[in-house]
Image: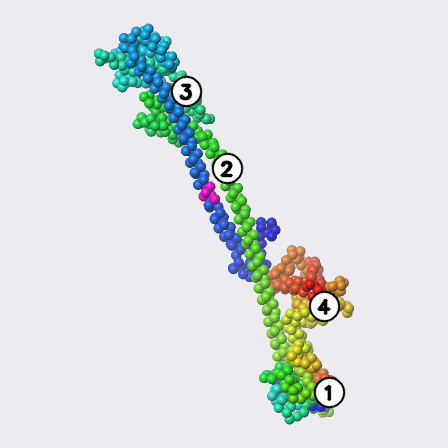
Amino acid sequence: MRLLLVDDEGELVSTIAERLSFRGIDADWAVSGEEALAKAETEHYDIAVLDVKMPKISGIQLKGMLEGKYPDMKFIFMTGHGSEDDFIAGSAKDLYLVKPIAIDTLVSKVEEIFKT
Amino acid sequence: MSLKDIIKPKFLSGNDRDACTCATRHLFNFSRMWGIAVFLTLLVALVPLISMTLIHYKMTQDAVESEVHNHTMLLVNNTWRSVSRFYDERKNELELVANDYTYEDLINPNKLANILINIRKSHDAFIDLGVINSSGIQVNYAGPYTLIDKDYSSQESFENAVKHGFYISDLILGFRDIPHVVFLMRCAMADGSFFVLRATLDIEPINEMLAEVDIRGSGDVLLVNNKGVLQTSSRYHGDIFDKVSQPFFDKVSQSLSDYSFEIQVVDCKNSKGEMIVVGYGNIPDTPFILMTVQQKTELMDRWQKTRVRLFWFLLVSITLIIIVILGMSTYLVNKIYIADNARVRSLHKAEYSNRLASIGRLAAGVAHEINNPLAIINEKAGLIKDMFTYQDMYSKDKKLIGLVDSIISSVERCGTITKRLLGFARHMEPSIQSMNLREVIEEVLSFMEKEAEYRSFTIDLDIPDDIPEIKSDRGKVQQIFLNLVNNSFAAMQDGGRLSIVVRHEDKDYVSATVTDNGCGISDTDMKHIFEPFFSTKLKKGGTGLGLSITCDLVQEIGAKINLQSVVGCGTSFKIDLPISLDKERK
């Protein structure tokens, strides 16, 4: 199981990725939509954890792009707004986590998706 | 608008709570506006009315005065004609005697007696007849007295008769010592000499004639000579031979100095200073002046009545105009005042709402921006903890793990605050949704918990689990409770107690009662507590809009608000929230 963490805050996603590795989850990270798309070209990821608000390509747009190319890929959104309303543009079945996220919550969500 | 509002409108009372007299006092001077409206309307209405009434007054007065003068003129003229005709007829009769009889006939006593009898048949005013020779000696006489051989040569009347041919004397007593008037006619004889025919006239016919004149009230008809001596007895100006000492006679005698026979009417003052109307005219060929003297007030009696009616008409008209103008001006200015007040209040509320929305957006922005560094701190601290947990070299240092846990705990607290801020700001946008009242109240209290903690407030929540969810505008419900709790906090001393009790006693409503044990609200303040800009904390930063907006919000969501308060004991606000906003709106 491989995760791709995408957020314009590199410090955040790199740390989350490292913490996930302690929990046995292989996670890669990117600081923009373009970098995420580039990495997805070369690597396989089961789940993408995307920040909603990012410069140039937003999390919602990135999801659409990745979903088109990799239909099996699952998505989890991270948001600083703390509201389900932020996901009106996204799919109702998408999971979301409100920043600051609890690592155990993220792990449980990932495991939940992986099981389904 | 009640009668009280018309008699004592709000805009004249200068209430500081009113929007227009407080925030924009310099723009809305309603007292001045009212004053200008009343002044200008009164000016436009009363000036023409008073002017027309004065013009009408003057015209009517002139008309009545003219009528009085005409009436007096007519009266004097008629009397003047009668008196003149009397003397003229007597003169003609005497001329007839002079022409018909010779001197020899006239000095015959029997013939003269017969002549006297004959002329007395036409008028009994003649008392006697006498014949005076050119030497002034009365040579014959017919009448009741013995006057033969009386010498008249030195008398002015004889001299005047010789000089002018005819003479009528003033009223005199003469040799007989009885008031009478003498007619003397110079008669020429064939030999060039002359004699004088002398007749004495009784004054009684003239007296009777003047007594029959129809003159009103204290009016008087006088026959005076040119020296002002009364020739007949009068009602109010003395007896015969009395001199009329009234100042008006001077005016009359001056105007008649040219022996004009024109009848004249003048306004004068009598010796008492009262206005009188004097009509007068010379009696031709006599030294007499006929005069009528009448009190002007009596003659103007009809005018007095008209004047009183005119005065009452003016008074009633002015009173009615003033009442109508005051009423209308007050009504209209009050309407403008109320409309302006409502407009200014709306603007203030809109400004207040915009300010709240701006604060909400600012809070949301800040919370969002803080969330990212918080997330990094959280993750870094989490990584440290993971390293302590998963790597043996640190796992035994419990103190370090405790410190990291403390950082993570603080980050979680910050996260909770930013989530609340974001949630609260989001609910400022209007939206109808189902909500659990407990959640809403707890969310509101979570914002106030630090202040409650610092000021040692005790907050009791009594919300049963079976309270149904209500469907309403969450932001407005939040705002209502936030305002009420804020209000209670402001009213309480440190250590106060606030209780919020929620009940479902009516099938359509859920009631929430917010009670504090603060200072309470006086009965006087309670009447104005929901009015905009009313605040007992204006000097402490209160805007006076909190409860006013609360009241508006309560109405907007179809709820009801009730207030009970006891000064010194506390205040209780009860809000009945409809379970379904849609049903309430229908």
What secondary structure predominates along the stretch shown in magenta? Answer: helix
Q: Secondary structure at mark 2?
A: helix
The residue singled out by tag 1 in the image is: A114
Of labels 3 and 1, the one closer to you: 3
Residue at the left extreme, as displayed: B191
Horizontal and vertical percent for residue B289? 36, 24
- What's the mark number on residue B54? none
In the figure, residue A78 lies in which quadrant? bottom right
Residue B505: image location, x then y, percent: 76, 63
Q: Are marks 2 and 4 in contact (CB under 8 Å)?
A: no
Q: Amino acid at mark 3?
A: Met
Left or right, residue B420 beside residue B167: right
- Which residue range is magenta in the image? B49-54
- Does B55 sit above or below residue B554? above
N-terminal of the pair, mark 3 or mark 2, is 3
Which amino acid lies under the numbered mark 1 shown in the image of this protein? Phe
Q: Would you name the residue on which mark 2 appears?
A: B309
